[in-house]
Amino acid sequence: MLRHFLHCLMFPLFLSAGRLPASTTSCGGHLCSGFQWYPVATPTGSRNASTHFSALFDVPGLPLAANFSDPDFCHYIYFNIFFPNFQPSPWATYNQFVPQLMLGDALSSSSMAPDYTPSWGNFTAYVFSAQYFFAIPGVEANSFVPKAATGAIHPVSPGETLWTSMELDITTWVWTLSMGVVGDAARISTVAVPKPFMGLLAPHTTSWSELTYSAVHVNSCWELYGMESVGDWPSTGSTYSMRIETDTEDAIPFAGNWSGGGVIPCPGAPTLNTWREIHNATSQEVTWEIGWK
């Protein structure tokens, strides 16, 4: 339980890595469900089959009294997978696939190739996009530079349901990250990730087929910054349905010890933070409920 708690607390809190445009000193409300470690591909006969990562969650209500002009105010709400720090450089890190719901002063766009420089927008209503967030070593010793590859940004309303999918093609070793609104084919955001760190660390790392990327951490989070009052929280909760599936029976020892965790020192924090899971030989579904009793 302590290891669960520490990892959820430590990652992904991206303030130091540049997910926020300003130096935030206000309260952060960070809640996560689960911190599991699963393979990205499993054996099937003489070849491998991708593990499939997907989720559904309903968009919570907008905060009732948020100060959207405050650069500290930022909400990231998501289901994500992320890889361990790349070695031999611990400064190549934050290797995170994070299609996400956003509000406030949020990292939302990228210059894309060749530099993948992130940029921020200020949103007073919910938007979402597919995103790959990472950091590479900086010029100075023991420093890193935030980078991102992002898909289209779409609006979404409270009460609508978002889906997330992260799929690896093991013939090309390209990841595809997608997010959309259930029932609306026009609002889909996608980003293709052909290489780790979008190739910016070649020749040190060049392919998702490398052993370093053979497994990922899986969880969902409310990662909220600038939580100064009760009115800064979403006005309703949310229910997540997270799915991990494989094409090969009994290829993954699905973990039963998912949990709700995080640090919530902010006023008005959720009082409901529960989970349940079911699994069979090829798939696991984890339901996370967050909100107020």
Image: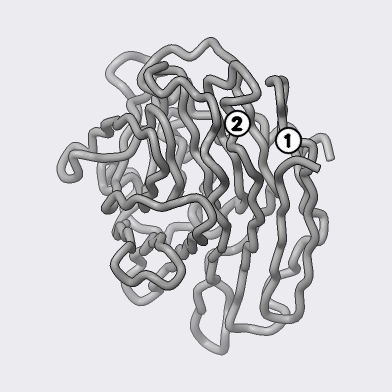
Toward the front, the furthest residue is: 64
Element class at badge 1? loop
Question: Visible in this render: residue 85?
Answer: yes
Give amino acid for label 1. Answer: Pro
Q: Which residue is mark 1?
A: 270
Q: Position of residue 163 (x, y in %)?
A: 49, 63
Relative vertical location of residue 176 with respect to residue 149 in this rendering, above or below? below
Q: Is residue 250 left or right of residue 238?
A: right
Element class at badge 2? loop
Toward the left, the furthest residue is: 114
User: Which residue corresponds to the image point at 82% horizontal and 35% vertical from the top-left?
Assistant: 2
For the N terminus, the image quarter is top right
Relative vertical location of residue 280 with respect to residue 13 in this rendering, above or below? below
Q: Which residue is mark 2?
A: 233
Q: Position of residue 29 (x, y in %)?
A: 63, 27
Alpha carbon separation for disc pair 2 and 1? 9 Å
Please say if the residues under marks 2 and 1 sit with CB atoms less than 8 Å apart: yes
Q: Is residue 214 left or right of residue 193?
A: right
Relative vertical location of residue 102 with respect to residue 263 in this rendering, above or below? below
For the C terminus, the image quarter is top right
Q: Position of residue 49 (x, y in %)?
A: 51, 78
| Crowding near the residue tagged with mark 2, few <14, some 14–19, many ≥20 C-alpha atoms within 10 Å | many
